[in-house]
Image (spheres, rainbow, N blue to C red):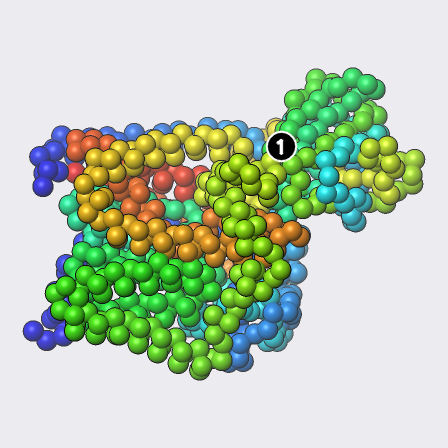
Amino acid sequence: MNAYRRATVAIRRIPLAAWSCALIACLNAACWSLITPPFQVTDEPSHFAYAQYLAESGRLPSDGGNFGPAQEIAMRDLEQQQVHYSPQNHTISTQAQQDRLERDLALPLSRIGPDAGVAASEPPLYYALETIPYYAGRGGTVLDRLALMRLFSTLFAGVVAFFVVLFLREALPRAPWAWTVGGLGVAFSPLLGLMSGAVNPDALLYAVSASLFYCLARGFRRGLTPKLAIAIGLVIATGLMTKLNFVGLIPGTALGVVLLTVRAGRQSRRTAYRSLALTLGVAGGLYVSMSTLVGQFAFNQLPSQVSSAVGDKSILGESSYIWQLYFPRMPGMHDYFVGIDTTRDFWIQGYVGLYGWLDTVFPTWVYSFALLPLAIVSLLLGRALLMGRACVRRRLAELIVYGAIVAGLMLLVGAADYSGFPKVIGEYAQTRYLLPTLALFGAGLALAARGAGQRWGPVAGASLVVLLIAHDFFSQLLEISRFYG
Amino acid sequence: MYWRHLGTTGKARIKAVLATGLSLTAVATSVVLAQSPSVVVATNKVRPQTTIYVTSYEETICQAGETLRAGVSAIRLWLNAAIGPRVTVAVFDGSKLIAGGTRAAGWYGTTVTVPVRSVRRDYSNTRVCFRVSSINGYVQAVGRETLPRLAGTSEGLTLPGRISIAYLSPSRQSWLARAGAVIRHIGFGRAASGTWIVYPIAALMLAAIALASWTVVRNLE
């Protein structure tokens, strides 16, 4: 069989649900990209400036705040500074303001600004890809290019949903209907739509992470083959070139690759070690060569993220801080987050609805009400795990790997947050930083649906999907009311 | 493959769930659109120009000479913090408490809006006090510098100015009645301006929901 036929057969084997979930995620993110005003998603001005400077000069930006005259003027006319962090202020709303914006956008201003603010320390892969729509918008204004770049970014939401369904196919092979529940749940995640509908490397990071979970699940189900080993290596290198946060996924991934190698070694040690070497070689080789090419290594940026490596703060204090960033304080711990239930106030509320520059919120009762479906889903998930405890025991190693990936990411985010302590706390307590684990979120939804039992499982799954559609829809209405109300 | 045994009954159930769920969403949307947004009905005419006070501790700040109109349902204070503290507002007419409310810690932004119980008539020359607690880091109160006799106070100390305050109550128009204005507003500040933008937004959302419904019926039957 030639390569073309093999590829055709492989594509035909992909469940239709994966394609439809991918398309839905793209449509949803495109909707978010149109609703959200320009530069009104966290850090979008910096990320746009990075891609713009890379496209215009071919060089990497520095971390100052000079974004280039064209972008600065557009942001001034859009009153970006007055609107962000200030929910009482809406976007421009008069014809006179619009006329001024259009007049200024037409000015032949320079697009070259050497800085990209907070984005400057990030690896360049996402921004290099964003130069494609940037160039496609040649002749257009800053806002034309931003709109095209946002639309390009929505494709990554599709990739996320696609790989989540494939991950579920490997992780829950006996419940094909549940793949749809997980895939659609992810496709309608408002936070995925918001971030993928903006210019932000998180969009690519989520896509890479979802594909990593798929590769690992495939390895645990079908064994580590040389082809899969190369794929894992490629995904790791891509992740490292996408965003610093991917480093948090590395320890769990390394554990997974080692376990897969040990398992494969029971069949053939030679093939197993060759596969391990391929993963390491592809990941390391690509990462080093690409980083050398651009002159920036992601790992070099880590000391500033992980404070204990450079600071004079105690490891115990840092551990306590990181614990409390996610979970309730335990007896004997110093209270780092006074009066705040971090699990609920940061992470659950962050998922339920905290959009724009974290300044777009639902009325308080919505967050309390959301705890009810969350409790029901948690109970159903618990029931599913209890019913399948024999399977859980059999696949404990795989679950430990997924847990290690989540823990690694949480540690990285927590350590980055601790670096700002005591001056600023909770700066990184944003749910979007945990979205690289969306595949597990999808698995949780699929399992919860299964937890309703064989008879009612599909009904529970359909109910979950409708609930998530409603969540997404009302989140979009919230965004509209905040910026245009 | 047990899902095949569900047969038409299973498919009918899924369709019923979808129809019910989407109908409920439509009903909830109608309820939301029939409600009125909170709008600013009055301010204390203090422009938020400068930081008046910074604190890291639990404190109560008061300022006199405020006017509380009938029907005010929320009070907005210009406070700034990395993670917003718990804010308790109390409005006094002389020594009598006439309105009050609390906003829990954990908010973001440059202002905090605290819901309060509304009063039936206007009160002039009231004293607005707010207590900040559960502070993580520091809190900045923003307003404008004034003469000491007009300034706010904190725990007996006179501040260098007054803090900006706005008073909100439900608009007379519902969201539905304001829909035209909102659609016009969406059309501003874009790559290609105009109200046409709402059509692709609606089309994208409807397409996503329709495709999701088809996928659910096809795969969950």
Image height of A408 relative to B88, above or below: below
Asked whether, in this view, residue B3 is left or right of residue A400, the answer is left
Residue situated in front as seen by the camera: B122 or A286: A286
Residue situated in front as seen by the camera: A358 or B56: B56
The residue where tag 1 is placed is B103
Question: What residue is rendered at 45% in x and 52% in y?
Answer: A410
Question: What residue is rendered at 34% in x and 35% in y?
Answer: A378
Query: Which image quarter holds the C terminus of chain A?
Result: top right
Q: In this rendering, does residue B2 appear at all?
A: yes
Question: What residue is rendered at 65% in x and 55% in y?
Answer: A81
Q: Amino acid at mark 1?
A: Arg
Asked whether, in this view, residue B151 is left or right of residue A484, the answer is right
**Residue B49 percent location from the top left of the image:** 78, 49
**Residue B114 percent location from the top left of the image:** 65, 32
Binning the other alpha carbons within 10 Å of mark 1 as few (below 14), some (14 to 19) or many (20 upward) gives some
Q: In this rendering, does residue B189 appear at all?
A: no
**Residue A175 percent location from the top left of the image:** 17, 44
